[in-house]
Amino acid sequence: MKRHYLTFDKFKKNALKDSVLKAEYDNLQPEFAIIDALIKSRAKNNMTQRQLANKMGTKQSVISRLEIGRANPTFSFLKRLAKALDSKLEIRFT
């Protein structure tokens, strides 16, 4: 029996054909952008969640919750995060 696997990209493309789901997905875009930027920046700096948390003076679980979308960071927290990642925090309205 041959198995057919659906890649995430194909799944996402098909799922976003649903207008209600697409509207919700688009509504969450800012949160996804922050999560994506955090994970990429942490990886670029070769840091684990624990290392980043230690550098910020917080717990690894806080970073984990942020990366999985279960946290709503304050502006102050985002500034500390950017500093710990040797990055600049930029917020834009387009």
Image (tube, helix red, strand yellow):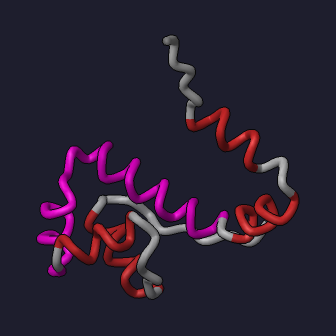
Percent position (x, y) of residue 18? Answer: 84, 54
Q: Residue furthest right?
A: 19
Viewer-proximal residue among 4 and 15: 4
Q: Quadrant of the C terminus?
A: bottom right
62 sits to left or right of 79:
left
The part of the image, by quadrant, that contains residue 31 is: bottom right
The residues colored magenta run 29-58
Percent position (x, y) of residue 76? Answer: 40, 87
Viewer-proximal residue among 17 and 73: 17
Percent position (x, y) of residue 15? Answer: 73, 48
Q: Residue furthest front?
A: 1
Tell me if residue 76 comes above or below residue 5 in the rendering: below
Viewer-proximal residue among 4 and 41: 4
Residue at 87% across / 59% down in the picture? 19
38 sits to left or right of 25:
left
Q: Is residue 43 magenta?
A: yes
Percent position (x, y) of residue 37? Answer: 47, 55
Residue at 47% across / 85% down in the picture? 75
The part of the image, by quadrant, that contains residue 63 is: bottom left
Q: Is residue 31 magenta?
A: yes
